[in-house]
Image (cartoon, rainbow, N blue to C red):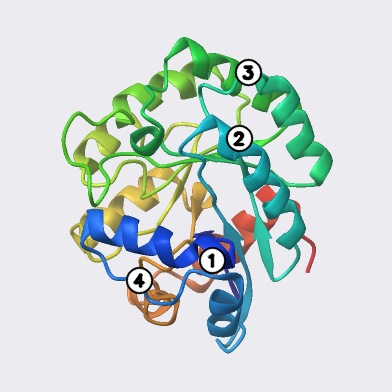
Amino acid sequence: MRFFDFHTHIFPNEVAENALNKIGGDSGVRPSFDGTYNGLNKIITQMDNFIGALNCPIATKPEQVESINSWAASISKMPLLSLGTIHPHSTNKKQILEKIKSYGLKGIKLHPEYQRFYPGDKEMLEIWQYCTELDLIVVTHAGADAGIFENICGTPERFSEIIKDYPNLKLVLAHFGGWFSWEDVDKFIIGKNVFLDLSFTLGFLDKNFLIDMIHRHGVEKVLYGTDAPWRDPVTYIDDFLSLGFSDNDNEKILLKNAAELLDLKF
């Protein structure tokens, strides 16, 4: 069964070690590789039936945006593609997003907890609108973070308002709609017009509850992802296959949905 990893993280060589030490230290989660392009590429190209992966970079300061996007564009080619990023406090949001589009990047990654924003903030409304107009995918962290459990900004309920107000936005809520907020995901998100990825999700919630939510949400709106290096790509695929979906549903979740969303041809 071929698969595409929709949610990974890699960093430029010169900052990868510090980034992993900082994030891993805050969260208590050990990385499965060194966080570099070559590190991830070495792992995934040795895996049977692996097609590609998507890097999801995050700018924690507005001044990081330009360099991150330039680097993302320079590395983004199969089998490792990359999104761009933007910061809520960036002053030239439309120009940044237009440049991301011109780079050929398919969208952006956001993180409410690291970037400290609420989905309904005034600064965010421009981003949702411009991404809709430019047909850019928005992948965003949702729910708690392994290092942040209090005062959560990106709750399922708040994202449900964005889904309602921007029906044409290509929105992907990571960690199956809200890490450690899955009862609220069930209440506010399941069945809505939004993609959910499975990154850093398997093993954290009841297996039967997850399977039931996937069926009720619709397998055509679910994307396989790992959150590598914070999960091991080699073992995570086995964890997913153990859920026992049909071959047809597996094909959609593991590859077809991502291929259609990213406009990939195989």
> Residue at left 38%, top 74%?
236
Name the element at disc 3.
helix
The extreme top residue here reads: 122
Q: Which residue is mark 3?
A: 129
Q: Distance between the Cα atoms at labels 4 and 1?
A: 23 Å
Q: Position of residue 25 (x, y in %)?
A: 25, 60
Of residues 7 and 67, the one drawn nearer to the viewer in this rendering: 67
Tell me whether circle 4 and circle 3 mark residues in contact (CB < 8 Å). no
Q: Position of residue 263 (x, y in %)?
A: 75, 52
Name the element at disc 2.
loop
Q: Distance between the Cα atoms at labels 2 and 3?
A: 11 Å
User: Left or right: 99 with respect to 189?
Assistant: right
Q: Which residue is mark 4?
A: 31
Q: Which residue is mark 1?
A: 254
> Residue at left 34%, top 75%?
239
Amino acid on which the number 1 mark rests in the picture: Leu
Labels 2 and 3: the sequence-earlier one: 3
Q: Quadrant of the C terminus?
A: bottom right
Amino acid on which the number 2 mark rests in the picture: Lys
Q: Residues within 10 Å of mark 2 (few under 14, many from 20)?
A: many
